[in-house]
Amino acid sequence: MDQPAKLALEDGTVYIGRAFGSVAETSGEVVFNTSMTGYQEVLTDPSYKGQIVTMTYPLMGNYGVTVEDEESAKPQVAGFIVREWARVPSNFRSETDLDTYLKRNGIVGIEGIDTRSLVRRLRVRGAMMGVLSATDLDNTSLVKKACGLQGMEGRDLVREVVPERGYEWTKAGLAPLAQSMLASHAETHHVVALDYGMKWNIPRCLVQAGCRVSILPGTAKAADVLALKPDGVFLSNGPGDPAAVGYAIDTVKDLLGKKPIFGICLGHQLLGLAMGGKTYKLKFGHRGANQPVMNHQTGQVEITTQNHGFAVDIDSLSKDVELTHVNLNDQTLEGMRHKKIPLFSVQYHPEASAGPHDSSYLFDDFRKLMG
């Protein structure tokens, strides 16, 4: 028998559906992702910490779940919303089904709601805090809980996803298809990656580009980074409000000009803040594998994977910072580089797991920047 579940938003809207995964209650910022595939990578992306993710594509779980597709050690989302989950997955790589995977990891899911209606509401009114429950089905109670939640602004979620200690990356490299998109190089450089909630495909791409990768928690100091004598420093993606991660901003400030730096997503935002810029919260964020970005250096349009709710204010950056990439949907900043200091960053995800490989060249650019 189906277990009922409800999603309540802070504006008082309540959606009724069926529970799958863990039969429990969760809360977080309700956001949406427009990817047609890659649900397991979405679930395990640490950048989604504290968020209940809605998938716009109507069917999820149809190809099952496999350990090889994980982007971290476990699912990181607060909850999962789908139109329909596939009861019988069909793929030779599948090791288990989506429902079992969510149950095993304590992730609450809901299916059967009108995800088109929900996404339209989020687009019009902006991302909202919400409560997803299969245990409390009282509308008034759920809405009250949603209204009492702290929003994403001012929240440091990085501390909840950083590794406990530093380590050397020794896991498997890129999948065969991805290897064809990014040229393989012999190991020539040593990179220290500051992990604020890093997707595993990033160190895979760095290794493919010829780098030995040492990973430090995002709470590390500049002295900890420089003590490893790297050829370059990588700043990873991660969750929450970049302006709330003051310790990371201070570390990046202390690294400016000392080593070549490459930042992605939260790493890009931290670089912007460290260089004196400002960040702001987007209305509903960019999340999906089909975001068009204009590369101002080549004049080409790249289709990109994105997952962020904050952006760097273009007008707040100094004249020494050159704008390199812009989002064609809303003209927000997607990439920048410094004219005098060896550093560059992008807001989107060139490691693209799952997603297009249009921007994988950036890992080669980083290798070249290190000399």
Image (spheres, helix red, strand yellow):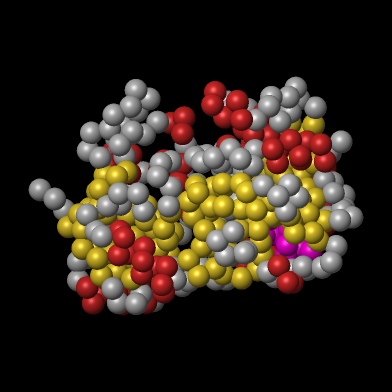
- Horizontal and vertical percent for residue 74? 45, 42
Q: Give the overall secondary structure of the magenta segment.
A: helix
Residue 270 is a magenta residue: yes
Part of the protein shown in magenta: 268-275
Q: Is residue 353 above or below residue 77?
A: above
Q: Residue at image x 32%, y 43%?
A: 60
For image coordinates 40% across by 68% down, the residue present is 122
Whether residue 298 is visible to the viewer of this picture, yes or no, is: yes
Q: Position of residue 23 (x, y in %)?
A: 24, 52
**Residue 164 in view in this figure:** no
Where does residue 310 sit, x and y in percent of width and height? 58, 64
Q: Quadrant of the C terminus?
A: top right
Q: Classify residue 40 by image quadrant.
A: top left
* Image position of 91 with respect to 55: above or below: above
* Residue 347, image x, y percentages: 63, 54
Q: Nearer the viewer, residue 102 or 65?
A: 65
Relative depth, front residue between 263 and 46:
263
Question: Would residue 149 appear left or right of 198 to someone viewing this image?
Answer: left
